Image: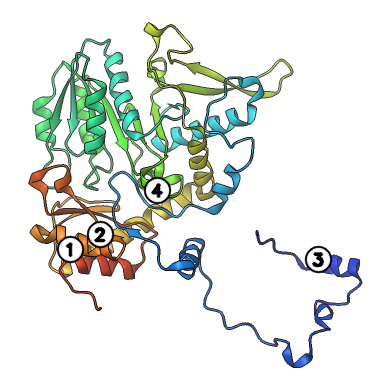
Amino acid sequence: MRYLPHTDDDVRRMLEVIGADSIDALFATIPEPLRLRQPLALPPPLCESELKQHLAELAGGAPPMALVGAGAYPHAIPVVVDQLLLRTEFFTAYTPYQPEVSQGTLQAIFEFQSMMAELTGLDVANASMYDGASATAEAVLMAWRIGREKKRRVLVSAALHPEYREVLATYVAAMPVQIHTVDVDASGATDRAALGKLLDADTAAVVLQAPNFFGVVEDLSALAAAAKAAGAVVVTATPEPVALGIMRAPGDAGAEIAVGEGLGLTGALAFGGPGFGFFAAKKDHLRQMPGRLVGATVDGRGERGFVLTLSTREQHIRREKATSNICTNQGLCALAGSIALSCLGPQGLRELAQHNLAKAEYAKRRAQQLGLKLVFTGPTFNEFVLDVGPAATDRLLRLAERRIVGGLDLGRFDAKRRGQVLCCVTEVHGRGLIDRVIGALAGQKEPT
């Protein structure tokens, strides 16, 4: 049941209608000794996310917690998001095929595109894509088309999410495209010198992640400048959209195509989805973008309306001219992201990002105090890598027995990094939980 507060004037008018002199008169049948004359002894007020956590604990114990991001980030999503999604005109994930009778949905998509363009610092964004991984692969194909399909080399940072790299490899497996991996340096960022050695006139695209898979904030401007000097298209992937609240927008840093994953804006992680992929680019490359775009127009009566301005998929145009076989956008999830961003606003998103940064920095300091070493020296956002050593597996398992995911052992993706644990801290993690997890990773025994 929703709580709707009443003003003093509302209360006065309701009392007049029922013929009561005051609120106290409504309780006249309750014996005087039983009436409460002082406020209830309640604990201090809680914010929305804290209240939900408290109610979950009262209902049946603490829910499982995870200090792991790696492309799927836990955030506190306002309940208004789910409530608005329940409206019947929005309660479908599919794209309208009759735009003339789908003005509300088209307007929602148009507003989503506007937000994504502003967030990424680029001219135009499409109506969303399936996820961040497929959006990254589509961006590489777009860069290849921009080069008139003559350039064959794609340079991909080793700090791009391993699963994004796998999806990209699948996309280009039957194409005349060669993928070359650029190593990271001691800071955890893409090695600029290594990139410079690999860049040549045959390079179609350079693919970076910001913040990268290890949580390190890349110097996008320097990397983009080197790539552009060689005539390559710069593609950035951002699986953590909250970071853009304080980071320089990819477009402002030199990216020509910026993609990412919006799962962190849509709600519960739900085993990794569903989320939505966002895709933005410079206006010069508009006709090479995959998916569809909604535009605003004016009808014959001079009233504002919304239309599908561009749809470059194979079901709408000749297959040989299509830029993608993506069949639909993630309409419902994209709408959820739009509502969440609308609730936050630019200042709220910035404050949320600062909150994430501050908590992660606290966790890093706590780890170092307990003798754990940070693997990389570069600045990070809300993720970082700890060198836990051979004991990492046992310590993570002990935490799992207590329904806590303490981090991700990077040995899952690279045997050379076994024992290195990627941890993520966001606004949903309290200091007590952070201390507990970091302590366990450092080998401290919990009281029984």
Label 1 sits on residue: 395
Q: What scheme was used to colour the molecule?
A: rainbow
- Say whether residue 204 is left or right of residue 281: left
**Tag in front: 4 or 3:** 4
Above or below, comparing residue 430 to residue 226 in the picture: below
Q: Residue 406 carries which label?
A: 2
| Residue type beneath disc 3 | Asp
The answer to whether residue 188 of the structure is visible from this angle is no
- Residue ID at (39%, 20%): 289
- Quadrant hosting residue 400: bottom left
Closer to the N terminus: mark 4 or mark 2?
Answer: 4
- Say whether residue 158 is left or right of residue 26: left
Closer to the N terminus: mark 1 or mark 3?
Answer: 3
The answer to whether residue 93 of the structure is visible from this angle is yes
| Residue type beneath disc 1 | Arg
| Mark 2 neighbour density, 10 Å: few (under 14) some (14–19) many (20 or more) | many
Label 4 sits on residue: 269
Q: Do the residues labelled 4 and 3 touch (CB within 8 Å)?
A: no
Screen quadrant of the N terminus: bottom right
| Residue type beneath disc 2 | Gly
